[in-house]
Image (spheres, helix red, strand yellow):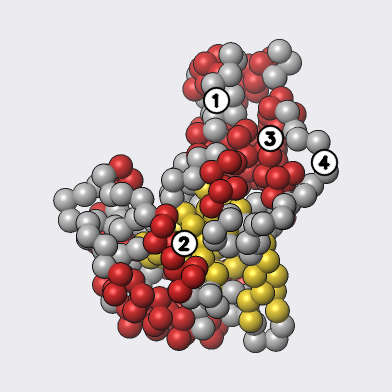
Amino acid sequence: MSGYSWSLAFVFMKNDFIKIDRSIAIAPMIDWTHRHFRYFMRLISQHVLLYTEMITTSALLRGDSSRLLDFSEIEHPLALQLGGSDPKALAACAKLGEKWRYDEINFNLGCPSERVKAGCFGAVLMQQPDQVADCLKAMQDSVDLPVTLKMRLGLGYEFDQTFLYEFIEKMQQTGCRVFIVHARNAVLKNFSTKDNRHLVPLRHDIVYQLVKDFPDLTFILNGGIHTIEEASVSLEKVSGVMIGRAAYKNPYEWTKIDSVFFHSEKEIPTRKGIALKYFDYVKMMAEKNIPMSILLKPFIGLYYQQPLGRHWRTCLMKSQDIKEKIKELENLMLI
């Protein structure tokens, strides 16, 4: 579409250039953007950039790396989001991401939860810009993948432009060129994660101004984008937009992504067509003993605000006996 500021961003690598279209991305979301949800979203759009949940360095280095990092080839382009504060640990995890053939490494400075704050990573790290810069540099030096940053506008309820601009300038000096900005501050004292979503104002205007004031950088807007139309408006002003909860609340809204933003001439899939394809995946994964509750969670919003919606959700939440569930779903999808 003419007029959009497309983000076919060329990110300098040690040996070459890599091209990632960052126009539309699905945000990393704890308990949601696991590999099964990402597979489901790939049935919605073949081109949208997908992100993992935030994976902490301790979980990755001390736990089952295969379980945490494995994915289906269909999920490309796919970014690995890391949480941590130790440069060496982050560098080691970035190397694992490269080994597993992820397309990007993303550093989380956006999560405001108490658990993340207690671990001294996520949004609280914005209080330590030198530490953040060391972490970014360590990851950049360890891999031949783009290393990007997901961040907030700042900390506390009041916006501080000087802090934000100095922070971005310091990260720019490390070589970071792609900034995914959740257009809210993070309030870390006496505010829950839900409070941070609902009580802290969105400031898209500040992200739009960053584009003008840092013309050599790529800014992706995150926060408050709920529809294709809203994404289109923002893409007039930024290089890309990131979709959060709207992706799982009403996934079918985003089936228009490929035709609107990526010029695809393929027919938009039907809800039933998506359901049947994903159900084939569910049956395959169920044979590998993946819990049905996890496999079916991405399905829940497929019939959002549709006449069949309540019946659909009821069916998904009933018996977890695999054979019974498979029979129920097969009958439902023949309606």
37 versus 75 height, above or below: above
- Mark 1 Cα within 10 Å, few/some/many (few <14, many 20+)? some
- Disc 2 vs disc 3: Cβ atoms closer than 8 Å? no
Q: Nearer the viewer, mark 2 or mark 4?
A: 2
Check the image and report above or below for 188 versus 328: below
Q: Residue at x 50, y 34 (%)?
A: 249
Residue of label 2 = 208
Q: Amino acid at mark 2?
A: Tyr
Lower sequence index among marks 2 and 3? 2
How far apart are the two marked residues, 1 and 2, measured between alpha carbons?
32 Å
At 75% across and 33% down in the image, what residue appears? 269
At label 4, counting other C-alpha atoms closer than 10 Å, the crowd grade (few under 14, some 14-19, many 20 or more) is few
Callout 1: helix, strand or loop? Answer: loop
Label 1: which residue?
Answer: 304
Discs 2, 4 touching: Cβ within 8 Å: no
- Residue at 49 percent across and 68 percent down: it is 211
Q: Earlier in the sequence, mark 4 or mark 1?
A: 4
Q: Nearer the viewer, residue 142 or 158?
A: 158
- Label 3 or label 4, whichever lies nearer to me, is 4
Q: What label does residue 266 carry, if any? A: 4
In this rendering, the answer to whether 78 lies above or below 213 is above
Observer-side mark, 1 or 2, equals 2
Point out residue 304 in the picture as x, y percentages from the top left corner. Answer: 55, 25
Q: Position of residue 318 (x, y in %)?
A: 50, 19
3D distance between C-alphas at marks 1 and 3: 17 Å
For badge 3, the amino acid type reads: Tyr
Quadrant of the frame with the C terminus:
top right
Q: Mark number for residue 278?
A: 3
Q: Amino acid at mark 1?
A: Tyr
**Upstream in sequence: badge 2 or badge 4:** 2
The mark closer to the camera, 2 or 3, is: 2
